[in-house]
Image: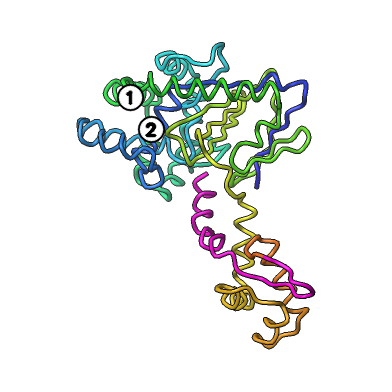
Amino acid sequence: MPVTLVLSSADQAFVMTRVSPLAELCACLHALDEPGHHPAAARWIARLHAETDSDLLARATAWAPLWGAFRARYLLPLSPSPGRSRSLADELAEIEALPIGEFTAMTLQALIGKNGAVLGPNVLQRLRLISSSRVELGARVYDDAHGFRRELLGFLTGFAAAAFDADWPGLRTALLAEAAVRERALSVRGAMTFADFPAATVSGDRIVLDKLYSSTEHITADRPCLLLPSLYGRPHFVVKHYPGYPIVIQYGVGSTAGPSLEVVRQRLAVLQHPTRLMLCRAILRNPVATAELATQLGMTAPQVSRHLRHLREAELVHVHRDGAAVYYQLDAEAVGRVGADLLTVLYR
């Protein structure tokens, strides 16, 4: 279920790198809310709990669904704007100027966690099935969207002043350096630069991004793509494509590509078969030839070979040949990573 970006060679100039203090602030706030999978933020989070007013931290928790796994679109740049970096005040002013209907729809999409969420009588009921904190925020934006927005902007301004603004100059320097490197890569490699991102593949004019839902979006002059590096965003790979606004990709600086969802799914399916599990046990400690495995398991050599082929295609075994004999040994490290790889893909 990929997100596919269509980028013709004529439109490659409409892929731009940007540095966003608002996006990085919200990456920090997300790490604060879910510290378990953000080890790089551990020191900042510890300092925050030691030095920051408890009421401010409680308010951060109350607003947290907006910068969760499905980030509210307005918490990322709403326009391409010239220059690689803008001020936080300018980005917050764009949220304030957003038509209130768009603001409400973007809020509800974030709370429901689904593209295309629309206003309707069943939205609050849906939110009740997700969490009490989300239905509370949904009710508030329904009752008074303008007041909701003022409170949110006030919180973001206050939190930034207390816990982010002092760190931002150093973060900005590092992010600008990454953006410059990415900009140069775009000028040289064009669309192939996207292949550097986690679980992204490039085929002709199509960039396929490994996400848990399907969509096809076109990058054009009217709808450019903004690449936002993030120091606190790892391991997430955020892709937003709200109609009428730039496509935005926020990626973690230093993130490794890792496996795709399809690779993880294939490995889980291969290991689910009881015969293959017996084969895994037989070849865990030592390499074993196909004929010997057939004898041990009471199977024919072609039967064993078919199961070994599945393990080989999933890259779960090491294979070497000695004369006519082919030996297989389980790649214990690859099997051990399956659970961690699955979590990485889901977090992504």
Compared to residue 90, the image places residue 72 above or below, namely below
For the point 71% across and 27% down, the residue is: 189
Query: Residue 220, image x and y in percent?
Result: 70, 22
For the point 65% across and 53% down, the residue is: 262
Q: Give, as a three-letter code, the residue at label 1.
A: Phe
In magenta, the rendered stretch is 319-348
Give the color scheme: rainbow, by chain, secondary structure or one colour. rainbow
In front of the other: 303 or 70: 303
**Residue 335 within the segment the image draws in magenta:** yes
Find numbered disc 1 in the image and state the secondary structure of the residue it sits on.
loop
Say which quarter of the image contains residue 294.
Answer: bottom right
Q: Residues within 10 Å of mark 2 (few under 14, many from 20)?
A: many
What mark, if any, has residue 28 been given in the picture? 2
Q: Which residue is the site of mark 1?
A: 164
For the point 26% across and 38% down, the residue is: 46
In front of the other: 221 or 24: 24
